[in-house]
Amino acid sequence: MEYDRSEAVGDRFELLRTYGYGLCMGTADALPGVSGGTVALLLGFYGRLIAAVTAFTPGRALAVLRGYHPDRRARAREALLELDLDFLLPLGVGMVTAVVLIADLVSSLAESHPVAIFGFFTGLIAASAITLGRSLEFASPAHVAAALAGTTLALLVAADVVQLPGSGPAVILVAGAVAISAMILPGVSGSLILILLGQYVYLSSELSAFVRAALDLLGGGSLSAVVDPGTTVALFVTGGVVGLVTIARIVRAALTRNRGVTLLFLIGLIAGSVPAPLHNIGETTAWTTETIALTAAWAAVGAIALFALERLVGGFDPE
């Protein structure tokens, strides 16, 4: 049988396009206020993404792992098709590429220009709450209560009234579970959750340190330099896998059961998270008149950027 080069080119183009989707989605998720799930909706692959993610079950994963046995290879191949790895793998690689690049940039800017980066994030979050909230209706007391509950919870966490423990292994696992679950939900940014949990800068710097140490290792660097940040990254990813098979499914079920109430709670979380980046500024910079003015200016830049993006794509819809 003659080898069909056109099919190979088509397959490569499809992989490259899916990788590009991953770059877009990862960039969105790495920036608080922009949702990777919303990007997936806008680019038209959200349904396939949700189908692939919800197909990931312990049973199918076990079937793939058992594929080494000749009698189980047919079931392993069937499970691989159900998991849609041809789509998920290039998408995931694209997302990881974008997140790594932005994490390195954010960790650098958080040290050198905290007012600019966190002021910008404040504007992004505030503008995203406005753009997403426009399409929702407060049709009943339950809708009002859901929005107030989400906003109040986020404000309490952002103001340190509800205090979370530092950055130990358990917190990193929980952060991974919640943040990666949020990544696939339209309207909610995974990095926004990390800012609210106080883990965004820490995890960005740990990811950057891990990538740099891994690259240095290829050139004869120290293995010990990889272990500490690598452990943090592994914990976060483990939490993310757990979140995808638990929390993400719970939220999806809630959206199916009562879409309006669930979306109002989620967007309430976004609205209540607006002050969260300001905490990062206060840790390194005194709140002078100049600092407040600069923060407001950068917040305006972030809001304008989000509104411009909304106009460019024809509007954001939480789902």
Image: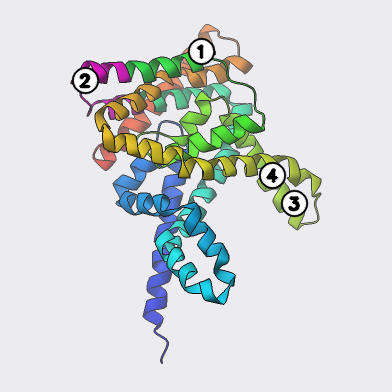
Q: Which tag is nearer the camera, tag 1 or tag 2?
A: 2
Identify the residue position indicated by label 4 in the image.
230
- Image coordinates of residue 197 in percent, x first then y, are 54, 25
* Res. 270 visible in picture: yes
Identify the residue position indicated by label 1 in the image.
159
Q: Say how the picture is coloured.
A: rainbow
Circle nearer the N terminus (1, 2): 2
Query: Would residue 111 be found to the left or right of residue 92 on screen?
Result: right
At a point 18% along the width and 21% down the height, the residue shown is: 139
Circle nearer the N terminus (3, 2): 2
- Asked if marks 4 and 3 touch (Cβ < 8 Å), the reply is no
Which residues are drawn in magenta?
Answer: 128-146
Type of amino acid at the residue the image marks with label 3: Asp
Q: CA separation, marks 4 and 3?
A: 14 Å
Identify the residue position indicated by label 3 in the image.
216
Type of amino acid at the residue the image marks with label 2: Phe
Identify the residue position indicated by label 2 in the image.
138
Query: In this rendering, is residue 224 above or below 297?
Result: below
Residue, far left: 139
Residue, far front: 71
Q: Which tag is nearer the camera, tag 4 or tag 3?
A: 4
- Image coordinates of residue 182 in percent, x first then y, are 43, 36
The question of residue 269 being in magenta is answered with no
- Asked if marks 1 and 3 touch (Cβ < 8 Å), the reply is no
Type of amino acid at the residue the image marks with label 4: Gly
Q: CA separation, marks 1 and 2?
A: 26 Å
- Image coordinates of residue 155 in percent, x first then y, are 44, 15
Q: Quadrant of the C terminus?
A: top left
Label 1 crowd bin: few (<14), some (14–19), many (20+), radius 10 Å? some
The dominant secondary structure in magenta is helix
